[in-house]
Amino acid sequence: MYKFSDIKGNDRIVKNLKSAVFYNKISHAYIIDAPKGSGKKLIANSFAKAIQCENLKGNLENDVESCGYCTSCRTFDAGYHTDIIYVNASKSKVIGVDDIREQIGKNIELKPYKYQYKIFIVNNADTMTIQAQNALLKTIEEPPEYGVFILLSENYNNFLPTILSRCVLLKLKPLNYDIVIKYIKSNFSVLDEEVYLYASYAQGNIGKAIEMLSSEKFIEMRNMVIEFINSFHEKDFIEIFSDVLVFEEYKENIMTVIDILYLCYRDMIVLKCFDNNNTFLIQKDKKSMFMNIIESFSLKQLFFGTKAILNAKKQLESNSNFQMTMENLFLRLKEKR
Ligand SMILES: [Zn+2]
């Protein structure tokens, strides 16, 4: 199931992990950091599986790969490997000190059941409370020789400096646009013009692309945003404020909605700057509509709009009040410049 060869992009990181496996120089603690959907689990699982494989393939450090058929590989693929342990939050959304004590503290004392290492993969490790991090710190400060910790995180800044200083930090990079396009083309049947659209929305994140391509909601959200922009310039402030309620229905996916809004503004700027030439236009299917809309906007207003959209995104990421942020955004978009 999990293989190094399935990992897209991030070649240098993958190369380093392969080399660690090949020379059996495994560090005690790693942090794999990237936004949701970037392939953190695939990398962690491929690495853990290769570390434990009894019959590694490949004679060169760069072709090393788990064999897929030894007892270790088979039990891992079947989901019951005794020496690769997943650690998760058990009671709430965050990993508490009890989770670390129960799932790691007690377990790490016992030697591996069968293999050279005992590997703990901690999901959402950046949600660990301070107490949980301190409990983990005790273990990773003086780990037994067989202990390996792979912490998966979306924001490594949440870790205590003492944890960070003891871990190898692997920050995944967004994938190259062409890799995402190739992935979409070979895994989904979509029209050519739509492939570029999805790849742009995905912003180098294959998980995001998969989520959008498998969800009807994405199309619905895009239509909602397009409809919003299309009637925006004709609306008065009362109507615009009531649009906040429409956006609120998509509150759970608000970051995607904001990304769509941003991309629409980006496309309108392209049309305005390049004199209706659509070479750089991403949403080619909406060209004539955008052409109509930009009549009512100055270039300066569009630029200012993109800035306001990014600003709102930042505020929403730091959990600011939804209604106020959106109202403020719509006011900024409406401001004549
Ligand atoms: Zn194997």
Image (spheres, rainbow, N blue to C red):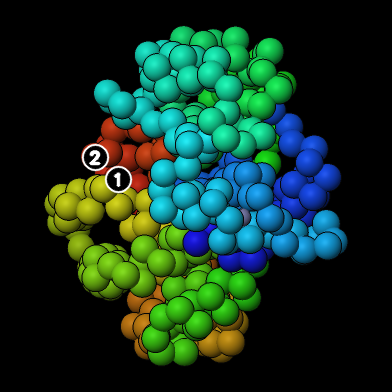
Instruction: In the rendered view, tell whether residue 211 sits above or below residue 273.
Output: above
**On the image, which quarter does residue 67 sit in?**
bottom right
Q: Quadrant of ligand 1?
A: bottom right
Q: Is residue 168 visible?
A: yes
What's the residue at 36%, 63% (across, down)? 211
**Looking at this view, is 233 or 121 the one in front?**
121
What's the residue at 35%, 76% (across, down)? 293
> Which amino acid type is marked by label 1?
Met
Residue carrying label 2: 323
295 relative to 24 in the view: left or right? left
**Looking at this view, is 229 or 282 the one in front?**
282
Residue 69's label in the rendered image is: none
Do the CB atoms of the residues marked 2 and 1 lie less than 8 Å apart?
A: yes
Mark 2 residue's CB less than 8 Å from ligand 1: no
Label count reads 2
Rendering coords of residue 117 (x, y %): 64, 33
Q: Is residue 228 visible?
A: no
Q: Secondary structure at mark 2?
A: helix
Rendering coords of residue 20 (x, y %): 78, 44
Distance between mark 2 and mark 1 Cα atoms:
5 Å
What's the residue at 80%, 38% (across, down)? 25
Instruction: In the rendered view, tell whether residue 93 sits above or below residue 276.
Output: above
Instruction: In the rendered view, tell whether residue 165 sits above or below residue 264.
Output: above
Instruction: In the rendered view, tell whether residue 118 sits above or below residue 300.
Output: above
Rendering coords of residue 246 (x, y %): 17, 55
What's the residue at 34%, 32% (across, down)? 320
Residue carrying label 1: 326
**Looking at this view, is 74 or 5 the one in front?**
74
126 relative to 65 in the view: left or right? left
> Which amino acid type is marked by label 2?
Gln
